[in-house]
Amino acid sequence: MRYFFTILLAFLLMGAVSKDARKANEAYKNGKYEQAISLYKKAIEANPNNAKLYFNLASAQAKAGKNKDAIHSFEQFKSMTDDPMEEAKANYNIGNVLAKNKKWDKALNYYKKSLRYMANDEDAKHNYELAKQKQEQNQKKKQNKNNQQNNNQKKKDNKNNKQNQNKNKNKQNQQNQNQQNKQKQNQDQQNKKQQPQKISKAEAEKILKALEQKEKNLLKKFKKQKTESSKSKNEKDW
């Protein structure tokens, strides 16, 4: 779709304008927009009630790329005119300024206003349709971007949840393992206490000799007691 962002210029009666205004018109036609801006401002100083001077100043500012200044001057013009058609032309020009800067939402609103009185203007209708199409495309892009961001966030959240689950699972496994190790350690200690302690060969021989000596002593004591008992019995018989 082609663009028709042509800025309209107000028609000024040559006899009703100053020399600066005529020079400004010539500079505008020759593409010398900065010079035209300066001359239109001088003309406005001399004739501040001439609304069309503001319209042409705004048109020159728009051509020079001074968009904010242009919109401000068009709005100034609108406040000075009672002609709905002239106001519609100003709205059309503001729409063009905004459209050049791809501000489709705002441009669409101004094109709507202009079409109330410029319904048969082909460029106005074309630019309105273009702005509407661009607005819908931007809304779709924005929606797709939001959907993509939401999907990315969802994937990120799922990944984080999975990582946290794995982390918790590993932590639980580690706790279980530590508990098992502790139980095994306690069991080993308990088994160790219950098992007889190993002794060296020398200690075993020493213990064995002690038992043998103890056995000899007991046997000796037993024989002694038996002998004394027998002796006591014989003495009684006599």
Image (spheres, rainbow, N blue to C red):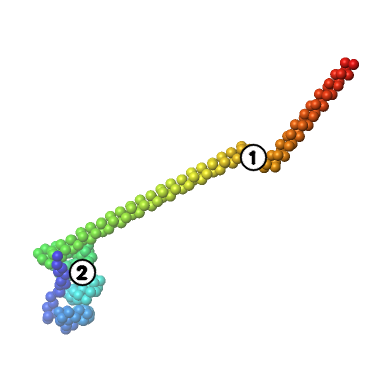
Residue at 22% in and 80% down: 34
Above or below, 147 against 43 in this view is above
Residue 89 visible? The answer is no
What secondary structure is found at the residue carrying circle 2?
Answer: helix
Label located before the other in sequence (1 or 2): 2
Q: Which corner quadrant of the image does residue 70 belong to? A: bottom left
Q: Indicate which disc residue 100 carries.
A: 2
Q: Residue at x 21, y 64 (%)?
A: 104
In depth, the one of 65 and 21 nearer the eye is: 65
Provide the residue designation for mark 1: 197
Assign a secondary structure to mark 1: loop
Looking at the image, residue 221 lies above or below residue 131: above
Residue 9 in percent (x, y) is at 15, 74
Instruction: Give the percent coordinates (x, y) of residue 85.
Output: 13, 67
Where residue 187 appears, as percent x and y from the top left, is 56, 40
Q: Quadrant of residue 201?
A: top right
Question: Closer to the camera: disc 1 or disc 2?
Answer: 1
User: Which three-letter amino acid code belongs to the residue tagged 1?
Assistant: Gln
